[in-house]
């Protein structure tokens, strides 16, 4: 099943997703800025939020978003 979930929360996107697509709408044009797989365990608990891979994904996506400003 495919679900498109829109959020402005990086941690929520990484926690819930198998793939995160960062989009930007500039001057009426939609652009895909980044498209990355999130390779974490299928069963996710709150302990995952301490996992180095989870934290790295959050940090990387945060850098992508900061670069848009």
Image: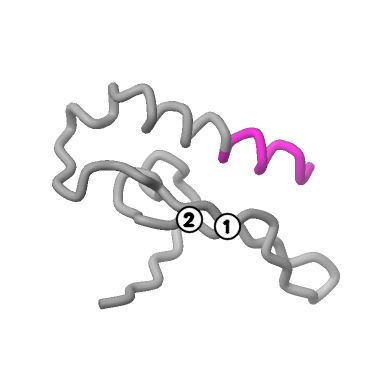
- Marks 2 and 1, the one that precedes in the sequence: 2
Instruction: Please report the residue visible at 64 percent of the width from the left and 54 percent of the height from the top.
Output: 34
Give the quarter of the image for residue 11.
top left
Instruction: Please report the residue visible at 31 percent of the width from the left and 44 percent of the height from the top.
Output: 15
* Residue at the disc numbered 1: 35
The residue most toward the right is 27
16 or 51, which lies in front? Answer: 51
Residue 48 falls left or right of residue 39: left
Q: Main secondary structure of the magenta part?
A: helix
Q: Is residue 18 above or below residue 6?
A: above
Instruction: Please report the residue visible at 25 percent of the width from the left and 77 percent of the height from the top.
Output: 1
Estimate how packed mark 1 is, as few (under 14), some (14 to 19) or many (20 or more) residues with alpha carbons within 10 Å: few
Residue 27 falls left or right of residue 49: right
User: Tag count in the figure?
Assistant: 2
Residue 12, percent across and down? 36, 46
Estimate how packed mark 2 is, as few (under 14), some (14 to 19) or many (20 or more) residues with alpha carbons within 10 Å: many
Q: CA distance from mark 2 to mark 1?
A: 6 Å
17 or 7, which lies in front? Answer: 17
Q: Secondary structure at mark 2?
A: strand
The label shown at residue 20 is 2
Give the quarter of the image for residue 26.
bottom right
Residue 58, percent across and down? 47, 34
Could you tell me if the residues under marks 2 and 1 are in contact, i.e. CB atoms within 8 Å?
yes
- State which region is magenta: 61-69
| Display coloring | one colour
Q: Is residue 68 magenta?
A: yes
Residue 40, percent across and down? 30, 42
Q: Is residue 31 magenta?
A: no
């Amino acid at each position: 099943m495919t679900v498109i979930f829109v959020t402005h929360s990086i941690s929520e996107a990484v926690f819930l997703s198998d793939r995160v697509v960062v989009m930007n709408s500039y001057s009426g044009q939609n652009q895909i800025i980044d498209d990355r797989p999130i390779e974490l365990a299928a069963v996710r608990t709150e302990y995952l939020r301490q996992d180095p891979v989870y934290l790295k994904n959050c940090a990387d996506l945060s850098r992508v978003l900061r670069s848009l400003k």
